[in-house]
Image (tube, grey):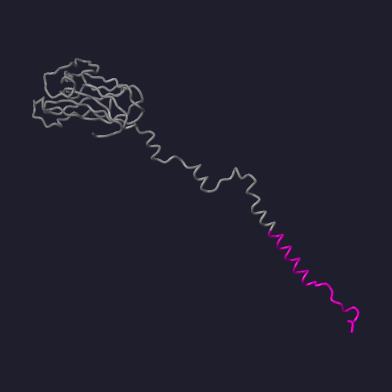
Amino acid sequence: PAPPAGRGRGPNTKGLLIGAIAVVAVVSLGIGAAMLTGGDDEGGDNKAGPSQRQSESSDPSPSASKDKDKPDEKAELPEADAKALKLEGGTTTASDIEGAKSAGGVYVAGLNKVGAQVTWTVNGVPKDGAYTVFVGYGVPGKAAETTLVINGTASERKLNMDNFAHAEEGAWDKGWTKTFAFVQLNKGTNTISVSCQQGDKCDANLDQMWLKAGHVKD
């Protein structure tokens, strides 16, 4: 028999509702994804990740800055026999005492009076910075000290010209040795003087002078 009128199967409203909810969910997910990724294109060139920003703002390392200011230790630095320097105040050359390392054994004598001075005009200093000036000299078995003048300014400390060779008193030929002083020099040309000032003990002969980069002791 035919089903009663008005009792036929109607639309599946439950299935349609579930389908509609699913469509809404998919659309919502799509919109959310677009919102998350869409900002990458806008102004992306002006944005940097944490590591990039840190790299751009970091300063040069301390060691790199220090190396930049440090004189080149491999550079050829000037040296000179004292006899070739400017002699003033009664200083003169001599060669009767054996043992000087300068060419021909010629050294500078006559430093032992106030106003006596030897001046070295140093050319070719590679850059501003710290240097060590070495002075080869000889003493007669007793200590001396003189005044070191850099670019016209006297050093606060005397140049220590002690009897480092441990020579017996009066043994000039056994008293050849060296001393050093830490100085600051300018790039290019500088003047370095060893002089005898009031109160100094200047009984010494000068042999050679030379420079090394940095503050070193040998």
Q: Quadrant of residue 116?
A: top left
Is 12 within the magenta?
A: yes
Residue 178 lies left or right of residue 123; in this view the side is left
Which residues are drawn in magenta?
Answer: 1-29
Residue 60 lies left or right of residue 24; in this view the side is left
Foreground residue among 101 and 121 = 101
Q: Quadrant of residue 200?
A: top left
On screen, residue 211 above or below 10: above
In the rendered image, the residue lying farthest to the front is 1
Q: Residue at x 30, y 22 (%)?
A: 122
The x, y position of residue 78, in whole percent, is: 28, 24
* Quarter occupied by the C terminus: top left
Residue 8 lies left or right of residue 197; in this view the side is right
Foreground residue among 144 and 53 = 53
On screen, residue 107 above or below 67: above
* Quarter occupied by the N terminus: bottom right
The x, y position of residue 21, in whole percent, is: 74, 66
Is 38 within the magenta?
A: no
Picture mark count: 0
Foreground residue among 216 and 35 = 35
The x, y position of residue 93, in whole percent, is: 17, 16
Foreground residue among 193 and 187 = 187
On screen, residue 172 above or below 64: above
In the rendered image, the residue lying farthest to the right is 5
Q: Residue at x 60, y 43 (%)?
A: 45
Q: Residue at x 51, y 48 (%)?
A: 51
